[in-house]
Image: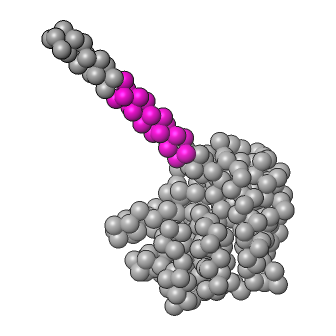
């Protein structure tokens, strides 16, 4: 074989290798774009928080259904859990599911303790806390070396002023009925004057598998919070939990 022919074959081989390399790079870019699209869709997917959990069997259901958040109520209510029970529930639940501790005008020391013991991952304040209280709590939690999301629950009425919370330390707002945990809807017309809400926010108060889709389509919340809406006779109902999660996860917010 003469030298010219050998050089031509080498050139053809290099071109073929270059084409393979270019094709591989193009495939990698497509794969990266698909992954980015998937991440973006996941970020925009409406989140679901199942609150008021009290039993180990509830955690079994959540481990199978994988909601975005699980809520434990430390405030006085029929769903209140002790710190001892909360520790058992945390141990029974996948670490991939963050636990939200729900408090009403509780001492900061209790929240700090539960965060430090890694029983809760998120703090929800459902009392008369002020933006200043959230600022103080943030400083205390930061000293633990933890980035702990804060949710401020707000009982909706004609006098509600959401604007005071937009510059607060709250990572999320949770808009609820005046009587929290009762499973009653508040007048959703109250939301209209506040839209678009300037922070990520959860819609709560009377949500259930039957009305969740309509409310999400109408208001596009970042997430939905449910407790009594997935209960039967005051206990968490596995089938209602599954239906609720499926309903919420079919939606995306802007």
Which region of the structure is painted magenta?
18-39
Which residue: 65% across, 42% down?
A: 254
Q: Answer left or right for 126 relative to 185.
A: left
Residue 65: tell me if it is visible. yes
Q: Tell which residue pokes out farthest to the top in this image.
A: 4
Residue 126: tell me if it is visible. no
Residue 149 location (% of width, % of height): 49, 62
Residue 163 location (% of width, % of height): 63, 49
Q: In the rendered view, tell whether residue 178 sits above or below residue 107.
A: above
Q: Where, quadrant-wise, is the N terminus in this rendering?
A: top left
Can you tell which quarter of the image residue 38 is in? Answer: top right
Q: Tell which residue pokes out farthest to the left in this image.
A: 3
Q: In the rendered view, tell whether residue 24 sits above or below residue 105.
A: above
Which residue: 52% across, 63% down?
A: 150
Which residue: 45% across, 39% down?
A: 32
Work out whether residue 69 or residue 122 is closer to the camera in this orientation and state it.
Answer: 69
Residue 16 location (% of width, % of height): 33, 23
Q: Answer left or right for 204 relative to 66.
A: right
Can you tell which quarter of the image residue 49 is in? Answer: bottom right
Residue 153 location (% of width, % of height): 64, 64
Work out whether residue 50 or residue 192 is closer to the camera in this orientation and state it.
Answer: 50
Q: Which SS type dominates the magenta stretch?
A: helix
Work out whether residue 132 or residue 154 is closer to the camera in this orientation and state it.
Answer: 154
What color scheme is it? one colour
Q: In the rendered view, tell whether residue 56 sits above or below residue 212.
A: below
Which residue: 81% across, 80% down?
A: 232
Residue 44: within the magenta? no
Q: Tell which residue pokes out farthest to the front in this image.
A: 1
Q: Answer left or right for 124 relative to 12.
A: right
């Amino acid at each position: 074989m003469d030298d010219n022919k050998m050089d031509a074959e080498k050139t053809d081989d290099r071109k073929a290798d270059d084409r393979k390399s270019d094709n591989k790079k193009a495939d990698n870019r497509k794969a990266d774009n698909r992954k980015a699209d998937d991440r973006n869709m996941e970020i925009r997917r409406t989140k679901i928080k199942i609150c008021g959990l009290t039993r180990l069997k509830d955690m079994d259901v959540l481990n199978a259904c994988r909601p975005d958040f699980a809520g434990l109520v430390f405030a006085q209510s029929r769903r209140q859990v002790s710190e001892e029970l909360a520790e058992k529930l945390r141990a029974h639940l996948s670490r991939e599911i963050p636990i939200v501790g729900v408090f009403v005008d509780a001492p900061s020391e209790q929240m700090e303790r539960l965060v430090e013991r890694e029983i809760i991952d998120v703090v929800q304040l459902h009392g008369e806390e002020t933006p200043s209280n959230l600022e103080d709590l943030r400083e205390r939690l930061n000293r633990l070396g933890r980035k702990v999301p804060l949710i401020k629950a707000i009982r909706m009425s004609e006098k509600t002023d959401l604007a005071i919370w937009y510059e607060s330390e709250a990572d999320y707002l949770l808009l609820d009925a005046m009587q929290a945990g009762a499973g009653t809807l508040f007048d959703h017309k109250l939301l209209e004057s506040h839209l678009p809400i300037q922070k990520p926010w959860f819609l709560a108060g009377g949500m259930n598998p039957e009305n969740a889709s309509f409310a999400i389509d109408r208001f596009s919340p970042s997430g939905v919070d449910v407790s009594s809406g997935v209960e039967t006779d005051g206990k968490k109902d596995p089938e209602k939990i599954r239906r609720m999660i499926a309903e919420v996860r079919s939606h995306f917010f802007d």
